[in-house]
Image: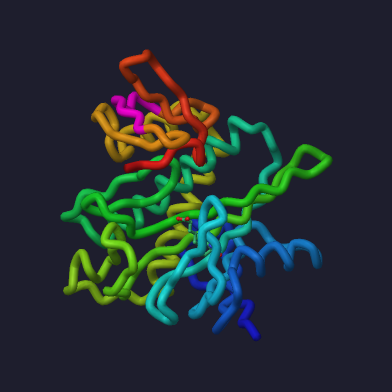
Amino acid sequence: MYNFSPMKKPDYLRRIMEINRISLSEVDSTNNYAAKLLLEGKVPHGTVISALHQYQGRGQRSNTWESAPGQNLTASWVLHLDNSHFEKIVALNKAISLAIRNSIAHYLPKSIVKIKWPNDIFVNEKKVSGTLIETQMHADKTATLICGIGVNVHQTKFQSVKATSLFQENPNLDIALDDLMENIHQNIALYFNEWNSCNSTKIEQEYLSQLLGMNERRSFEHQGNVIEGVIIGVDEWGRLKLETKDGMLMFQAGDIVWQ
Ligand code: BTN
């Protein structure tokens, strides 16, 4: 059961990206739900599917995404692109990370909010948000993105000591999940517009300026070995560039794990 209704929004946003909301009380995964809707027919650009309880949330690399019912944001945005160039899609992934980062920084203005490559959002070196972007390429060279975003909002108990929530970082915060969702929607709309209208260099530079560990020495695990290196960037293919004792090495997301 869901409500499908336009939300109130500022005029500038209406021109950029309409918001169509599908609010579910529970679902296996909002990304799965979006994929099923796309199979059934047209889903407008900017549709966002949110659920109060996601009981089989999916994370990157086939991980699960656990989220306490009713406490966090679990939502998926459907974005239609008229261009399926791989580098353009990588740049859009970076733009979406910046959009989420800025929303979280809006609620935690006194905290250090960074993007952990490729697209986690970390506050004070703990994870507050994860993103699972699933891309569908079409024969006519257009593409559709299902952009699933989980933000820990009110939850205070986590299995991992490296997880946090907005409330845990600032117990004075009283955030309505819908307000956070709308704030993220506005930022996605703004960055989508920027991505559409400019070359990717500006987005790439901004992404690097917000990257956790940029120009710092960090350790990773790669095929059972520890690799140490200074993070010197992320290329247009989305690969992490590390300056190591063996020279510059580049890694795809999933090939190395942060330590
Ligand atoms: C990760 O950090 O591994 C990515 C987590 C992505 C979680 C979100 S919650 C909404 C959407 N639906 C899912 O099943 N996953 C994403």
In this rendering, would 81 be left or right of 241? right
Main secondary-structure element of the magenta-colored stretch? strand
Query: What are the residue bounds of the magenta stretch?
Result: 226-233
Depth check, front residue: 37 or 58: 58
Residue 15 picture location, percent across and down: 56, 54
For the C terminus, give its image quadrant. top left
Residue 104: percent from the left, percent from the top?
32, 57
**Residue at the extreme right:** 139
Identify the image quadrant of residue 83: top right
Q: Is residue 205 covered in magenta?
A: no
- Residue at 78% x, 44% y: name it: 138
Give the x, y percent position of residue 230: 29, 25
Q: Nearer the viewer, residue 31 or 254?
A: 254
Quadrant in which residue 175 is drawn:
bottom left
The chosen color scheme is rainbow
Viewport quadrant of the N terminus: bottom right
Q: Nearer the viewer, residue 6 or 163?
A: 163
Q: Residue at x 52, y 53 (%)?
A: 60
Residue ID at (51%, 52%): 189
> Residue at horizontal 40%, vertical 53%?
100
- In the image shown, does 110 or 157 lie closer to the viewer? 157
The single residue placed furthest to the top in the displayed view is 247
Residue 231 is covered by the magenta coloring: yes
> Where residue 192 appears, x then y in whole percent?
53, 46
